[in-house]
Amino acid sequence: MAPHAGLLTAAVQVRGLTRKYDERAVLDGVDLDIAPGEFVALLGKSGSGKSTLLRALAGLDAGVAGSGELVVPANVSVVFQDSRLLPWARVLENVVLGLTGADERGRKSLEEVGLAGREKAWPNELSGGEQQRVALARSLVREPELLLADEPFGALDALTRLKMHVLLRKLCAAHQPAVLLVTHDVDEAIVLADRVIVLDEGRIVAEEHVELAAPRSPADPGFAKMRSTLLEALGVSL
Ligand SMILES: Nc1ncnc2c1ncn2[C@@H]1O[C@H](COP(=O)(O)OP(=O)(O)OP(=O)(O)O)[C@@H](O)[C@H]1O
């Protein structure tokens, strides 16, 4: 099946997913569907199980085997808080690592993330924001059906983070992967996502569809209302 051809089929289908460490359930019967091309943000307090869920979807946690139903596409890319670039490989080599004959596609991806001309740079010659741009290019050159992102902008300054939001929206509009973005930042979730879910002690305790018009502004009353709903679900009272 061609990527995104199955519009009626969920890109991600999770049922009753449970993950225990020493009898303690860190994920406790999670059900989650993500449609092709849908952008879902995952909020939750520290320790609520966000990264555990993301790692399960990424196929990085053998410990979830047999605990429930977990269907993800074959082509999944993951972006982490740190870019995880190989320091001994130049930027373009990092982007196309493991893909043969993909230099031209790699160049195009670097252009898409605003790094045309930096193909031959070494990772340590780039700023933190630029390194995350390379990480995004490395993911998107593989045209993933599912993009998993664990706090990808968590280590960036506020201004760079805003620029990355604009970039990520543009890239998602162009490539249409299903996305699961883990974040601590309620505003980031509202700005970027079609749907925001809140995890608490391994259970999904809230779900909000974001139907605000673009560009989404925190100054918008609908934005502020959604922020307080989500903060309440996170147990934060203002
Ligand atoms: N390998 C492990 N062994 C034992 N417990 C673990 C392991 N990995 C995660 N946990 C526990 O599972 C719980 C959920 O961790 P997880 O990293 O998923 O939380 P999180 O919501 O992503 O937190 P944060 O926002 O702080 O990154 C935590 O209590 C953590 O201590």
Image (cartoon, rainbow, N blue to C red):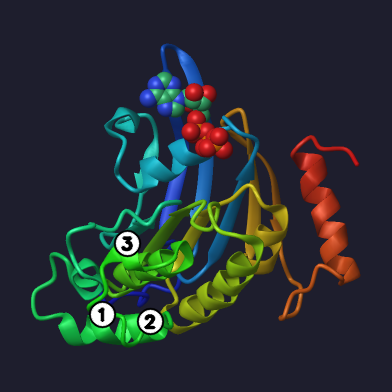
Toward which corner of the image does residue 23 lie, by quadrant?
top left
Look at the image and tell me whether residue 26 can be seen: no
- Report the residue marked by disc 2: 115
The label on residue 124 is 3
Instruction: Give the number of the mark in front: 1 or 3.
Output: 3
Rounded to the nearest angstrom, the CA distance separating label 2 from label 3 is: 15 Å
For label 2, count other residues whose C-alpha is less than 10 Å away and answer few (under 14), some (14-19) or many (20+). Answer: some
**Cβ–Cβ below 8 Å for labels 2 and 3?**
no
Image position of 43 (left or right of 34) = right
* Residue shown at the point (13%, 65%) measured from the top left: 98
Q: Is residue 91 left or right of residue 195?
A: left
Q: Where is residue 151 in the image (x, y as percent from the top left)?
A: 52, 51
Residue sitting nearer the eye, 131 or 8: 131
Question: Badge 3: how crowded within 10 Å, few (<14), some, or many (20+)?
Answer: some
The residue that disc 1 covers is 119
Q: In which quarter of the image is residue 73?
A: bottom left
> Which comes before the other along the chain, label 2 or label 3?
2
Nearest the viewer among 219 and 125 is 125
Q: Is mark 1 on a helix, strand or loop?
A: loop
Amino acid on which disc 1 is placed: Glu
* Residue 129 image offset from top left, x and y in percent: 48, 66
Residue at 68 percent across and 67 percent down: it is 191
